[in-house]
Amino acid sequence: MNKSLLILKREYLTRVRKKSFIILTLLVPFIFAGFTILPAWLAMQNDEEERTIGVYDATGQYSGRMENTEFTRFTTIPQAEFEQIQQDIKSSSYYAVLYIPSDILATNKAQLLSDKQVTFDIKNMIGRKLENLIEADKKAVIIDGSGIPDLEEKLLAARTSINLETLKVGEKGEAVKSSTELAMGVGYAAGFLIYMFVFIYGAMVMRGVMEEKSSRIVEVIISSVKPIQLMFGKIIGIGLVGLTQLAFWLILMFLIVSGLQMFLAPDQAEMLTQSQNMMASSPQIQENAVLNIIDLIGNLNIPLIIGSFIFYFLGGFLMYSSLMGAVGAAVDHEEEAQQLMLPVTIPLIFSIIILFPVVKNPEGTLAFWASMIPFTSPVIMMVRVPYGLPAWELLLSMGILVTSIYGTIWVAGKIYRTGILMYGKKVNLKEIVKWLFYKN
Amino acid sequence: MEIFKATNVTKDYAGHRALDGVSISTKEQSIFGLLGPNGAGKTTLIRIINQITAPDAGEVQLFGRKLKANDIQHIGYLPEERGLYKKMKVGEQALYLAQLKGLSKRDALKSLKYWFEKFEIQPWWNKKVEELSKGMQQKIQFIITVVHKPKLLIFDEPFSGFDPINANLLKNEILDLKNQGATIIFSTHNMASVEETCDHIALINQSKKILDGPIDEIKESYKQDIYEIETTVPHDVTSEFSRNGFQLIDYELKGLSQRVKFRLEKEMTSNDLLQMLMQKMEIRSFREVIPSMNEVFIQVVGHANPKKQTA
């Protein structure tokens, strides 16, 4: 078998078979699913409890008009019972008691009495019901007093809610619906994912090189293969470990989400209508957003995003991991590594610092230059791609990155070859720069 | 037949010359000792033979032709800085390193089986390296060096870091490999092991080769007309010797006999000397002192680096 392949295979298999890798790969999607889906699911579970609310209405206007919902019933109670409950709330059989004072129209105040903390949903629901009743009454008085015929219909017709559609106009004048929020979310996620993987797996390359150096096996190996073969077998092997993990995460997350969706499908539909009722002020927009989201995802340039993601993922990884591998080769101890890692990781950390400003203004000067400079472009360009950008910018950025990777690999290879066989020498940046001019 | 030959090998590192026109050659089925003080350039030469680094000038030949990239499969190398992956299983690791040397998986397994049986270490196959003692790891390291049946073996300081038992085992294995037809180059400071094993040596000092030849001839050429005799007691040897112009080096009274070591400071064959002494005293033993490799080393290197010696 080809020796580079042998190295790649070892680097890959030893890491993929590690318990820590398997646990992390399997666990993260579940944790993620847990954090996103479980709260919503649990919230729905609560709503199935049947509750009875006692209503003491001092005005006598509203109590009879409080409509029952599926799980919540309203019962009118007389003053005597209300006073008794006030004395000894624990003995009451009601979940809570609503007290509508006689001066409610003047004060806009009512009370909900209970011996426990009333849930947020119940409080909101009762408040809204009461508001609607009072509003309707007030409206009726105004309409009656004005003497204008069909005023109610006219007012209803005047109600407006604007659905601001964002359209992106292409070069040929065709307009495509776009969603700023969606582009923002996708860009942020892609940029952050690249940052995280480059950091974690780059550090893994560094530790792998240091392991070989400190265990002194490296000279045994490079008497069989070229140092550059060893370095790239390791980098590519570890890169594949990263891709494997990413692939597993995506597949597992997809399975979990779709599995839960199937399991929860009827409930979820109900939840959706409930949430729409809650935001009754703009039901139309809500509905539109739900319908449009699929449409909008379709309008994102998915192949371009995935293609660029893989390109910048690998590009960023190759660039940083070869530098981190060189750091690993140059040092003897972990502490020295920390010191030399800093100049390597500063641009990477910088790109995460400017991530948010770029997300907010993907066409700005900062965004442009940061997506051209190869040390920041893997993270920053991925933030910009979902918004769409001129082809020449993307191609230029990719070209610069590829060229820089060649340069970086040359530099890293030089440092690696010299450093890997050098023991007991405290290495600083100046020393490393000298190595670049060594003949091998 | 010369199996390996380096001609005028020169290697520069930034600001210093590690090797300066060094030429050595080794005969097939022999043991070649590469000697020299620390930093003389031995490891650089060894790394050049292993193609870890390339010479700036000069040529390296193997089997009578220029060294090629895939010659590494004919070379077994035990570096001075050596080790194994600590978290990897012994068998898996040995197999991996054997395959890196160019063996097919099947051949590698076969050869490893032979060596594991020979050292009676089959039970270690599935152990992690970190579970083994240092001595056990050294055995694995040796097996990895020879697993691909190399024709040329290079050991850089093979006895450093080995305990006496494993060092002895290693020495016997090296002699065994030679008898089976391998050629061995090893670098060492351990002069006793040089005398026990080497047929031929080269001494490198300050990047240059300063001595080269079969070990017996070198020792012969460095003898300094020193003799050691043992005589019966009553004779006053010391005054006798100074009268004859011999330089007394060592004197020891041992019960009824006395042992005298001296340097002959005039032209005289050993036979003439013996004849002369026989007339004056009763001699129990007489021998010309041949310097040990250790003495040759100190004499040659000390002479070449006078400053280092006094410093």
Image (cartoon, rainbow, N blue to C red):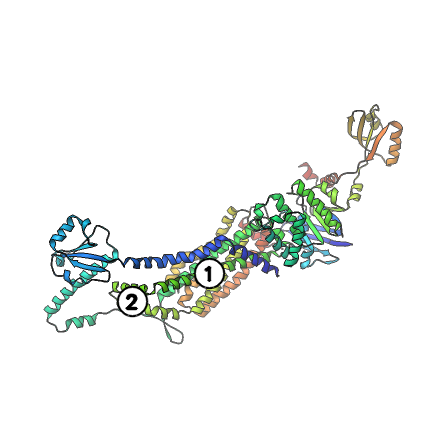
Mark 1, secondary structure of its residue: helix
Q: How many marks?
A: 2
Identify which residue is drawn at 70% across, 44% down: B171
Query: In the figure, residue A353 lies in which quadrant?
Result: bottom left
**Dot 1: chain letter:** A
Question: Counting other residues with Cα less than 10 Å from the Cα at mark 2, is it few (<14), some (14-19), or many (20 or more)?
Answer: some
SS for dot 2:
helix
The crowd level at tag 1 (other Cα within 10 Å; few <14, some 14-19, many 20+) is: some
Up/down of A110 relative to A300, above or below: above
Residue B208 pos. (x, y %) = 71, 47
Residue type, label 1:
Phe
Tell me the quarter of the image containing the N terminus of chain A.
bottom right
Q: Earlier in the sequence, mark 1 or mark 2?
A: 1
Relative to residue B55, is residue A353 drawn left or right? left
Is residue B206 shown to the viewer in this render? Answer: yes
The tag on residue A286 is 2
Toward which corner of the image does residue B39 lie, by quadrant? top right
Q: Residue at x 17, y 72 (%)?
A: A153
- Residue type, label 2: Gln
On the image, the x and y values in percent for residue B104 come to 64, 59
**The quarter of the displayed image where residue B256 is located:** top right
Reply above or below: B179 against A279.
above
Q: Which corner quadrant holds the C terminus of chain A?
A: bottom right
Front position in the image: A187 or B131: B131
Residue that lies at the very extreme toward the top in this rendered image: B234
Q: Nearer the viewer, residue B124 or B204?
A: B124
Q: Say whether mark 2 and mark 1 are on the same chain.
A: yes
Identify the mark at residue A248; answer none if there is no mark: 1
Q: Label 1, label 2: how many angstroms apart (C-alpha)? A: 33 Å
